[in-house]
Amino acid sequence: MTPWIENTMYAVAQLFLLPTLALIALLFLYAFWLLGEFAVLAWARRHGGGRPLVAAQRAQGPLSADELDLRAHKLLEGPRIASRVAPLLGLVATMIPMGPALKGLADGNLAQVSQNMTVAFSAVILALIAAALAFWISNVRRRWLAEELLEIGAAAAPKAGA
């Protein structure tokens, strides 16, 4: 019974390789999309714009601190999730081809070992690049949003004291 369970687990794990690689490719593209969005936002901030919380406060009137905090969290949600999920998928994409690579090594098929290790290392490299970009962007944008919250608080403070 044990070989059946092992073979089933192996077969099921192999089914996840292509979806995992596809998700890594999407996260890699998303990280570069985030980088472009970040560059545009940085340029806008240098020219007096690029402040989504301040813009929302001006457009909709006074928002509560909780509403502003929720908006900030929504703005950071994509990059934060990408920065955490990409390395996990990279690990999965590394481990799945290791089974066939080790099997190929045991069978003396070095071409199979090479092919599987190439997939494993390429996937983890792309996943880590995506995670690093998303992590950096998320942290800088978190600081920017904190600055905006301070700016909004400072603008509201004189009105409250008047």
Image (tube, grey):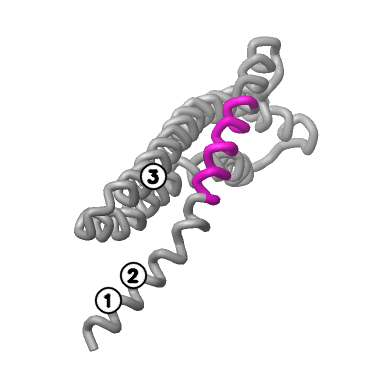
Q: Of the residues tagged 3 and 1, which is closer to the observer?
A: 1
Calculate the distance from the C-alpha at mark 2 to the C-alpha at mark 1. 6 Å
Q: Left or right: where does residue 103 sit relative to residue 160?
A: left
- Residue type indicated by callout 2: Tyr
Among the two numbered marks 3 and 1 on one chain, the one whose residue lies closer to the N terminus: 1
Q: x and y percent of residue 102 in the render?
A: 24, 56
Depth check: 53 or 15 in front? 15
Q: In the image, what residue occupies the spot 22% across and 54% down? A: 108
Residue 61, image quadrant: top right
Depth check: 156 or 112 in front? 112
Q: In the image, what residue occupies the spot 36% across and 49% down? A: 116
Of all residues, the one furthest to the right in this rendering is 59
Q: x and y percent of residue 103 in the render?
A: 26, 60
Q: x and y percent of residue 97 in the render?
A: 35, 54
Q: Of the residues tagged 2 and 3, which is closer to the observer?
A: 2
The residue to which callout 2 is attached is 10
Q: Left or right: where does residue 23 sit relative to residue 55?
A: left
The residue to which callout 3 is attached is 87
Calculate the distance from the C-alpha at mark 2 to the C-alpha at mark 3. 22 Å
